[in-house]
Every structure is written in structure tokens, then in C-alpha cells.
Amino acid sequence: MKKRVFFLVLALSLVLLATVAVANVEGIKMYVNGNEVKSDVPPVKQENRVLVPIRFVAEALGCDVQWDEAKNAVVITRNSGDKFLRGKNDPAQQNPSIHTNFVKAADLLAVLDDDKDGDLCDYRDGHSGGDSIANDPLVVDTRLKKDYDAGHIPGAIWISPAEEIAAPANLAALKEALEAHVARGGKNEIVLYCFTAHTAGLAAGVLGAEGLNVKNLRFGYAIAWEGTKQADAPIYGPREDASGKPVPYAPAAK
């Protein structure tokens, strides 16, 4: 009988300890750069220390976490400025709102061609004049340079491909271009575009995490602007080459 009572007391003690431990854990929250980070493994309070899951904290700081079986070690690496742009979302964004972060091609055309003369951003040197820069965002092409040179949205600039846009030098160049655009009277907003809006969408999320006001061209250049790929009704908007001359459409394009 005493033996049974002993085991019963021991069992109750373990349950009580577990309950106390859970109560302590439930009150612990993790914040990284002001954003709450939640994990499937809760923090543990032990001997006046709080033990947290390293993967969730490291990834929230923009690091990559891997298990090295050969070394029996956790390997944490971070490439400055990369922000997991290559195929991964920025983990610092806890509440993305991608559906409100698009610009339609027709709407972009309207603000770039205020006077509706077909000459976009014609406040540029060598153009007709008449458009207002006040409502114009800074339009940035995130495709390869050769694609930009072959044809791009009039007035758009090129800094780097989308995969490299968050590198420190490119990010600095982008901020400098935006400052110059705003100084000329332009809108403090960036519109990115790629071929189909996928990579530009990733870049927009990363640049948004850097504090920039960034939007993405819905369906991208090839689908919504140029109309060479079909997924939405294209507007067959104007294009220009590296020298600023208009790029004509081939007869089969429309």
C-alpha cells in the first residue's frame, strides 16, 4: 500500500512540475527586430536562462540554418544584403499583404502618360513635354540588362537583376535613384517589373522590408505590358530601346 502511495505521489509531483514548466513557457514571447516570432518549439526557462529555438531566431535575422551530419553541428550563415531573395521570402515579414501591392499596367500607363500623347514620361530631355512627374513612381526593370536594352517601359531605369537588387551596392544605388526622382518632383514610390511579376514580387517584398515604398507590376512586362505572353488582356504599351528610341511592334504581336 505504501509503495502504491509513493508512486501516486511521485506521479502527481511530475504532473505538477510539468504544469509549472508549461505555465512559465506560455508567458515567454520572442521578438526579433520588433516583430514577434512564433515557433512550433516553445522557449524553455531553465536556471535563470531562457532557451529559444535557434532556427526561428536565426532565420528571422536573415540567416540560413543547416544541419551538418558529418560535423554533427548546426551551421548558421548569413550573406549580407541577400535577404533570402534567391527563392525564399524574407522571414522578417510576418504579415505580408501581396494582394494590395500590385499596379495594373493600364494604371501605370495612365500616370506615366498624363497628356495621353503616347510619349511616356515626356518631361525627360529630348521628349515633347506635357506629362507631370508629380504622380509618377520610379519604375525599375529587374530583368537582365540585355532584356532591358532590347526593350523596356519608357522612363524605367535598370540597376541590377532582381536576384541582386538587395546587395548593398545595388540597394544604395536604388535609394539614390529614388531620392533623385523625388527631388525632381516625382512620387516617393517604386514600381518594379520583371517578365511575369514573379521575381519582381520577391524583390518587392525584400525592398519593402528595407523600408522602401515598393509595388509590383501585375502580371509583368511580357504578359500585361508587352503582350507577348498570354495570361491577361495586354495593353501593348509603348517600348523603347537603350538609346531611348521607340521599339516598334512586329505585326504578329497584336
Image (tube, helix red, strand yellow):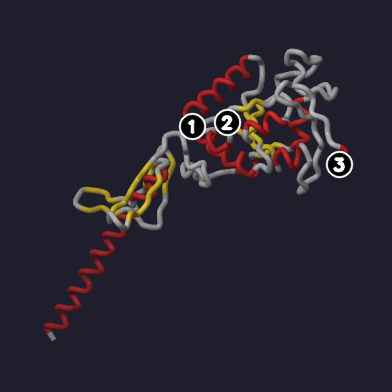
Residue at 76%, 33% (x, y): give it: 107
- In which quarter of the view is residue 220 placed? top right
Give the residue type at disc 2: Ser
Q: Are marks 1 and 2 in contact (CB under 8 Å)?
A: yes
> Which residue bears the numbered disc 2?
160
Front residue of 121 and 238: 238
- Label 3: which secondary element: helix
> Which residue bears the numbered disc 1?
167
Coordinates of residue 99 in the picture (x, y in percent):
65, 44
- In the image, residue 16 sits, relative to residue 170, either above or below, namely below
Q: Residue furthest right?
A: 251
Q: CA distance from mark 1 to mark 2?
A: 9 Å
Q: Earlier in the sequence, mark 1 or mark 2?
A: 2
- Label 1: which secondary element: loop
> Which residue bears the numbered disc 3?
252
Which image quadrant: the N terminus?
A: bottom left
Front residue of 160 and 212: 160
Name the mark nearer the viewer: 1 or 3.
3
Give the residue type at disc 3: Ala
- Horizontally, is 181 left or right of 231 in the view? left
Coordinates of residue 234 in the picture (x, y in percent):
80, 41
Residue at 26%, 64% (x, y): give it: 18
